[in-house]
Amino acid sequence: MPKLLVVTPVKNALANTLETCKAIASSSVEVTHVVYNDFSDDSTKWGLEEAKQVYGFELVHLEDLTNHPSPNYKLVLQLVQKRALEMGLPFVVVESDVTVGSTTLENLLEHCVREDGLGLVGAVTTDASGRINYPYEKFKSFTGTYCDTKRSLSFCCTLMTPSFLSAFSFEELNDTKDWYDTFISKKALALNFFNRVVFDTPVIHKPHSSRPWKLLKYSNPLKYYLEKLLKRRDKI
């Protein structure tokens, strides 16, 4: 029986996504993995259709469920919360620009099982050489195996516990936002849960490779903020 529900939202970036799916399929703990295709191009869509036979994930095309343009993170979170509660399982978001280790998901699950009051637990992100990178640079000087924090977690690779999922309905998420990492992190704290970052099971993160336009933030900040303002993109 699966012990975790794992979800990966996808918008193009097929090669990175397949790397993510391959890693999840090799996990040391049994999972149900669901990939949500958020209006990707046709080559990505059909690539995912082929890959699901290889890596054993379920594939949901959001175009079959909604006409709302990408990103549809709120809808994904709502669908997954409902299913996780029905299954009685924690769920883990693993983004399509993240590669987990073989024991990453099992390690996150162990924190969930042994700690009452835990809301969210996230794996720290690193580059391929093992250096902590975006969005967890703020923890790069930490030397322990984990720390509890009031700072926001990212959904790069983050588990949400059944107790937190039962305490807050994602139907209440704000329609005006694109991303919910910060809001949900703060909501868990407001409901008297605690959040944790784990350092002894890092995941490799290729920042923004699932949405390349966001790389403008580093190469052309002015253009990035103009796009964000004029096109109302990347609302947190």
Image (cartoon, rainbow, N blue to C red):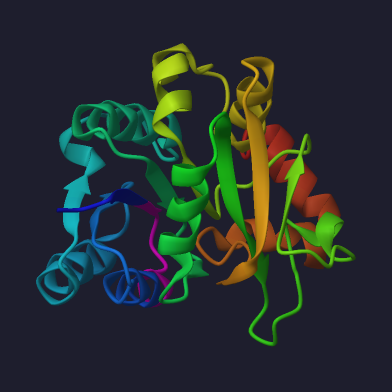
Tell me the residue at 43%/20% (across/down).
170
Quarter of the image holding residue 126?
bottom right
Front residue of 32 and 97: 32
Front residue of 61 and 224: 61
Q: Position of residue 37 (x, y in %)?
A: 29, 51
Q: Taking 84 as reference, is 104 left or right?
A: right
How many discs mark residues in the rendered view?
A: 0
Tell me the residue at 61%/70% (across/down).
202
Residue 93, relative to residue 228: is it above or below?
below
Q: Which residues are magenta?
A: 8-17
Instruction: Let me know if residue 141 appears in the view.
Output: yes
Q: Taking 17 as reference, is 122 left or right?
A: right
Q: Position of residue 39 (x, y in %)?
A: 31, 48
Quarter of the image where the C terminus is located: top right
Residue 25, relative to residue 136: is it above or below?
below
Instruction: Let me know if residue 220 appears in the view.
Output: no
Quarter of the image holding residue 21?
bottom left
Tell me the residue at 35%/26% (across/down).
78
Quarter of the image holding residue 149?
top right
Q: Taking 159 as reference, is 83 left or right?
A: left
Residue 24, relative to residue 74: is it above or below?
below
Tell me the residue at 44%/49% (across/down).
93
Residue at the right extreme?
A: 141
Residue at the front extreme?
A: 114
Q: Taking 199 as reference, is 157 left or right?
A: left
Residue at the top extreme?
A: 172
Q: Position of residue 41 (x, y in %)?
A: 30, 59
Q: Position of residue 135 (x, y in %)?
A: 72, 56
